[in-house]
Each structure stands twice: as structure tokens, then as C-alpha cells.
Image (cartoon, rainbow, N blue to C red):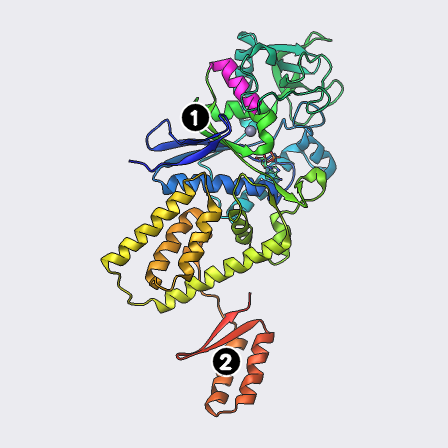
Amino acid sequence: MKNKILFFNNLTRKKEIFKSLNKNLVSMYTCGPTVYWYAHIGNLRTYIFEDILKRVLLYNGFKVKHVMNITDVGHLISDADTGEDKIERAAKKEQKSAFEIARFYEKEFKKDLKLLNIIKPDIFVRATQTIKEQIGFIKLLEKKGFTYIIEDGVYFDTSKLKTYGRLWPKKMKILPGKRVEMVPGKKNPTDFALWKFSPIGVKRQMEWNCPWKRPSTNKKTKGFPGWHTECVVMSKKFLGIPFDIHCGGIDHILIHHTNEIAQAEAAFGKILANFWLHCEFLAVGGKKMAKSEGNIFTLSNLIEKGFDPLAFRYLSLTSHYRSKMDFTFESLKASQNALNNIRNFILDLRENKIKEKLSREEKKEINYFKEKFLVSINNDLNTPEALALMWQIIKDNNLKLKQKEILLLDFDRVFGLRLNKLEKEKIPKNILDLIKKREILRKKRAWELADKIRKEIENLGYKLEDTVEGSKVKKIS
Ligand code: AMP
Ligand code: ZN
């Protein structure tokens, strides 16, 4: 029997008990990056949330089949159908080919995932790997009467689908020129491009032959797929329809995911996925972090400033994924300190817990805390509550070190802070020599000189603690 898990499902706008289609296996699709630049830490907050979601499912005993796409074509400057392709624009700017740009930033993205200890998806799929299937899918929509062709490309007629806008808050209206810009010839403001024709006189780097004709020339023309079509085709290809969970950031709710759902319903008469989960924005001074706002930081920017990538992961755990999170370097510093303290606690504990044996009662106590942890994480991924429980355990004087170690490492299966891979930091030789020198002075009761050396060690970034077993040294965090 599986435990009860509650997720806030944006399809119903309610917290619901999670039920997977298959008893033991969860199918999950997460919208991946548009690889035209480095991911910023706002993007990465969403990928960390998705990793926590996956880890919670694994913790609950599920297997997870996880597919993530790489958008290497078709995402335009606006989320609707106007503006240049982000990758083609970056290629011009960096004077590289669109493929070079896409592959370079895909690699960088994967490096970020590794640094953040995000479990690799089972399948990465590039939009450019499924062009044939996308054309086939648009032909199916065409056969079912949901498309029309204008000078700009093949469009989806949203007025033909009664259920259009299933993810929208009630009564929302989209005004032309406001949320969605109007392309000439588009019938309804919410209609969207399934396939865009390459503009006349422009040679795109990424373009493919297609079966459709441009009305003004009545000739077949090259083009490229629309971003919303890519994700339906790729998710269905690897997970079938419906699948269990689809996620992304909240900016995907109104357009991208709405349009994915619409296409799947029109083509197959089915909902694309049963659960839709979205991560709130990472903001700076209340404003969404976005490249266009000029307020972004990349993971490398944080590393350059001396932070550990996992400090950003820890910071992401401190707020619930459905709450807006304001990024500041003060909060990142606090997370770095908290992470250092947990690491030091575990390293100390390893040295001191030797030979502790646990009674039946003490083992029961471990289960009690595990149950509590499960209640938090299974309640729509309440990571702030789960972190608070971890700190409560660390500070609990009635628990044995062995109990604490078991619990912390168990919780880390979800937190992913790599606590099981800690290695005692190597103390440099010059520091070890100074410690030796100080020990000799202390034995000779030359306290003043010994103190001078302690200060020297501190100036070099290390702290000494005198214990009954001798001096212990730690790096100052
Ligand atoms: P993109 O590469 O633009 O397709 O975005 C990748 C992912 O990051 C998507 O799931 C977006 O919804 C998400 N995202 C974009 N900006 C932010 C932000 N400021 N905070 C959290 N997630 C974001
Ligand atoms: Zn997508």
C-alpha cells in the first residue's frame, strides 16, 4: 500500500490525492530549457522543484519515468507567435550557427543540473529530433478540422475547441495586443502557430520541408514547428497519453501548457496529463527574474562569488514551491551557513557516534520522525516544514547521534544535499604544522605564544577548538 500524497493540481486548482495510472510507475514530463543562453537561477529553481517532486515519488516507493525536452528550435521572443526565434537570434549575436548555440547551452545546462545534484531525466529529447512526428501530428489536427493556414503558417483554431483554456483561472479573457499579440490573418486572439513558415527572403538556419503551401505563392515552403506542438509530440511519444504529471514554471500555465492541452484534446479527445504542477517565480526585489528584465544570475555567477551550488539548492528548499521567492545574497549566505553547519554536524557525528547501539525503543523513535517527515513532504512538497524537522532533530538532546545520522541521511534522499558524500576537508600542511607547534608550546605552558599561533591559524581561515582529546581544527565558513 502506498502512502497518501497530496499535490496541488492546476488542472482542478485543488489539492488532490495523487493517483498514478500504473501502480508502481509514475510518468512525468518536465518542460526543459530553451537553449539560447545559460539557465538563470530562476529557471533552476523550477528544475530543483521538479527534482524534489521526483525524489518524493521515489521516496514513496514509486519508479519514475522522467522525460525532459530540450527546446532547440521554435521558441520565439514572445511566448506567443511573434518575434524572432530565440536561438536564431542568439546565433546571429554570437556569430555561431544555431546548432552550435543550441548544443553549447544544452551542455552548460546539463552541467548545472549535475552541480545542483538534480537526478538526470531518463530521456532527454531535442525538439529537432522529432520534426517528422510533429508534422504528422499537425496533419492529424488538420484532418480533424482544427487548423487553418495563413501567410505566417499553420494555426490552431481555438474557437473549434469548446474546452479551450482548461488551465485558466475562471473568466479570464485574453485581449488581442495585450497578452497575445495578433499576427495578421489570425482568427482569434488565442489561436496559436503549429507550424511557422520561414519568412520570405529570409534564410533560416533551422528549417525543414513541410507539406503545406504559403497562400501568397501557392508553393510549398520551408518552416519550423511551434513551441507548443513540440512538447505534446515529445511527451506523447515517450510516455503515451494520458501520462501522470506534467510540470514547469507558472509562466507556462496561461499559454504554453494551455495550448499543449488543447492540441492533445483536439487530436486524441484526451487530457494530456492528469496532474499539472507549476513552480512560482524566483524574483529580485519583487520582480520576476528574467533575461529580459536584466536581473538574472547564473549558477556560475554564484560560484564565482564563492558559493556552493548546493547552497542555492538549500535556499530553494526553504520556501514552498508555490510561493514567490525573493532572491538576495543575504539569504543565499544564510543558506550556505546552514549547509556548512549541517555538513560539520555530520562530520563530527561520524567521529563521535562510534559503537552506539540502538534499542528497540530508539528504533521506533526513528520511525516516528520518518513518519513526520513523510507527512510534510507528501503534503504538496512542504520542504520548509521538512527542513524545520531536520533542524529539530539536530538540536534534540535526547536523541542519540546514531539516530540523528540515520534520519539525516534518510531525509537527504529527498533534499539531495549530498550529505552521504561528505569528506572531511583536508587541512593544509602549513596549518597542521602550526597546530603541532602550538601543542608543544602549550605543553611547555607558554600560553601567550600558543595564543599567538591560534590567532595566526584563525587569520589563515581555520578555527581551533580545544577538546579533551586534543585540538580540533575546522575551516571558518
Ligand atoms: P525557458 O528556458 O525560458 O523555457 O524556461 C525554463 C523553465 O524555467 C520553465 O519551466 C519556466 O517556466 C521556468 N522559469 C522561467 N523564469 C523563471 C523564474 N523567474 N522563476 C522560476 N522559474 C522560471
Ligand atoms: Zn513545454
Asked if the magenta segment contains residue 264, the reply would be yes
Whether residue 16 is visible here, answered yes or no, is yes
Which of the pair 59/330 is nearer the observer?
Answer: 330
Tell me which residue sits at (71%, 22%) in the image. Answer: 181
Label 2 within 8 A of ligand 1 by Cβ: no
Identify the image quadrant of residue 138.
top right
Q: Residue furthest right?
A: 201
Whether residue 416 is visible here, answered yes or no, is no
Q: Quadrant of the N terminus?
A: top left
Name the main secondary structure of what is drawn in magenta.
Answer: helix
Q: Where are the magenta residues, as a range?
A: 258-269
Which of the pair 297/168 is nearer the observer?
Answer: 168
Judged by depth in the image, the label closer to the viewer, 2 or 1, is: 1
375 w.r.t. 389: above or below: above
Q: Residue furthest left?
A: 360
Q: Amino acid at mark 2?
A: Ile
Residue underneath mark 2: 435
Tell me which numbered mark, 2 or 1, is placed earlier along the sequence: 1
Residue underneath mark 1: 243
Label 1 within 8 A of ligand 2 by Cβ: no
Q: Secondary structure at mark 1?
A: strand
Q: Secondary structure at mark 2?
A: helix
The residues bearing labels 2 and 1 have C-alpha atoms spaced at a distance of 60 Å
Q: Amino acid at mark 1?
A: Phe
Left or right, residue 56 beside residue 227:
left
